Amino acid sequence: MYRVKRINGYTWLIGDDIREDFTATMVLVAGKERAALVDTGCGVGDLKALVGSLTELPLTVLTSHVHLDHIGGHALFGGARDQIFASALEMEEWLRSGEPEHFLEERLRFLRAAVEGDEERYRIFEKNLVRDWHFSWKPLRDGMRFDLGGVVLETCMVPGHTKESFVFVERESGNAFVGDSINPTPWIFPESGTGVAEYGRSVERFREKFPEVRHLYSGHCMEDIGVQTISDTLECVKEVVEGARDPVVECYKGKVFQHVKNSVTMFYTERFV
């Protein structure tokens, strides 16, 4: 159900084991007083039990953005010692949208496509998927600091993939847990996030605010994607905004533009200059 990889003495990557080359990746960071869990994946199993096997500390769940493959297991963390933080804007829009009532079906549809024909794996997910979608949450804001006891995570809002996507940075280690905000295949669609130019400004702000960052861990990879992804993203944005003549490709959104720059392949529908 899950892959687990320890990257230092107090940090683990946890991935929904969807297929060999694709995970929904979470991060567990343990301090001396609390632990933080960045995202909860698709909710493919008993994530709470897995986290409990790694740390017995009270838990703070930090949400990179409110998409089904990042909040699927949130409902497991409703204990007295747990707390969940998420974008108020994105949570309110999600609750108003009616999507929660179809949360199970939408995740099953996502997993059906993601396993690419592996029927046995899909049946395991179908059997074990978290059914509940109800959870209490507190507003997550830009610039918040979560002191876990000797380990501090700082938040930085990076709008782009969604309207209020968040990145979580531990300055001392140089680790940044970036969700889908910065990754080799950014999906930038204004109807659910921002335009390309605004996304570029958000990434530049993040780079300037956290020059200590040396490692990037994204929401769909169990490896450091490399800090060069930041500069490659900014170069990609620059070329798109300057009027790159890009091919049109098909994806789940229908027809979109595709732009490639070094390690980054960006998909977008509009450019806001």
Image (cartoon, rainbow, N blue to C red):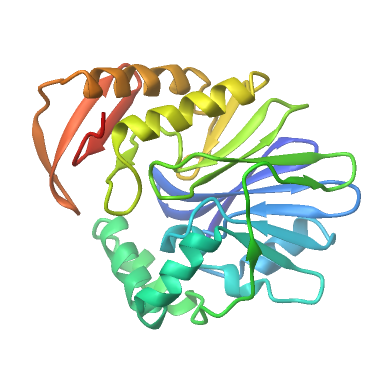
Figure check: 234 above or below 189: above
Residue shown at the point (62%, 25%) measured from the top left: 209
Q: Position of residue 207 (x, y in %)?
A: 55, 23
Q: In the rendered picture of this protein, how many numbered marks are placed on residues?
A: 0
Query: In the image, is 51 to the left or to the right of 95?
Result: right
Task: Answer left or right for 177 relative to 253.
Answer: right
Q: Position of residue 177 (x, y in %)?
A: 59, 39
Task: Give residue 29's position: percent from left, percent from top.
Answer: 74, 46
Compare residues 170 and 45 and report the one nearer the observer: 170
Instruction: Tell me: residue 148, above or below residue 196.
Output: below
Q: Quadrant of the C terminus?
A: top left
Extreme residue toward the front, this view: 273
Res. 127 visible in picture: yes
Between 109 and 17, the residue placed more toward the observer is 109
Residue at (60, 76) in percent of width and height:
135
- Is residue 238 positioned above or below 46 on the image? above
Lateral position of residue 110 relative to residue 250, left or right: right
Instruction: State the residue at coordinates (39%, 28%).
Output: 200
On the question of residue 99 being in view, the answer is no
Q: Nearer the viewer, residue 119 or 35?
A: 35
Residue 78 image position (x, y, % from top left): 69, 76
- Residue sitting at 76 percent across and 63 percent down? 52
